[in-house]
Amino acid sequence: MIGKLTGIVDEIGTDFAVIDVGGVGYVVHCAARVLSNLPQPGQRATLFVETQMREDAIKLFGFTTSEEREWFRLMQTVQGVGAKVALSILSTLSVADLARAVAFEDKAAVGRAQGVGPKLAARITAELKDKAASISAPLHIARGEGTVVGFTKPQGAAAEAVSALVNLGYSQAQASQAIAAVVAREGKELPLQAMIREGLRALSSAA
């Protein structure tokens, strides 16, 4: 099984890249976001790899980070989500955006991916909400990465917790990401004070 490839970018296609490692060209299927971040052909690149073996073929899927690969694996535990749909979602949403969408069950954001209808988007967010907390540092809180596409604002206690963190001097993005991390980890909203406390802890550890 191949877990990571480091080599020279030989070719970049519409949904794949060819990575030359010691004279052997590996065809690696990638999300559009990954392909757009690869260096130009002739330059060196590293990709985290997921190997899928079938009776008629062996396919390699490449990712910029190990978190991206974990989300790819996790999404395929949902009925109706295969490699193609998982890559489509990762092409549409960054890891941070996807983590927030799952944490707040934002079906609209996930549904923007090609091949993902409303029912499948609802199934993905519902089934992954509890599982997502197992992925290490999905939100990259310290960096404030990602702009949410079609992201629904948190409601109820989560919204109040975000507002409280903003009043304490954190940016809207940092506060939203911190509370999303808490909700994803716990699998549910906590009481307001507990959510603020855990959000502050997440922000402090990410600083």
Image (spheres, rainbow, N blue to C red):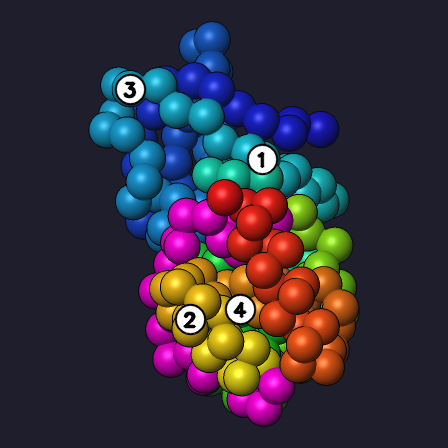
Q: Which disc number belongs to residue 166?
A: 2
Q: CA distance from mark 2 to mark 3?
A: 42 Å
Mark 1 to mark 2 CA distance (whole Å): 38 Å
Q: Which residues are magenta?
A: 137-157
Mark 2, other Cα within 10 Å: few <14 / some 14–19 / many ≥20: some
Q: Position of residue 160 (x, y in %)?
A: 53, 84
At a point 58% along the width and 81% down the height, the residue shown is 158
- Give me the C-alpha separation between circle 3 and circle 4: 34 Å
Indicate which disc, 2 or 4, sits on the residue closer to the N terminus: 4
Decide which of tag 2 and tag 3 comes sooner along the chain: 3
**Mark 4: amino acid:** Arg
Amino acid type shown at disc 1: Val
> In percent of the image, x 48 and y 20: which residue is there?
6
Q: Which residue is mark 3?
A: 43
Residue topped by disc 4? 100
Dot 4: within a 10 Å radius of its alpha carbon, few (fewer than 14), some, or many (20 or more) residues?
Answer: many
Compare residues 78 and 126 and report the one nearer the observer.
Answer: 126
53 versus 20 height, above or below: below
Q: Nearer the viewer, mark 1 or mark 2?
A: 2
Q: Residue at x 50, y 44 (%)?
A: 207
Quick one: label 3 or label 4, which is nearer the N terminus? 3
Q: Amino acid at mark 3?
A: Gln
- Amino acid under label 2? Val
Q: CA distance from mark 3 to mark 1?
A: 18 Å
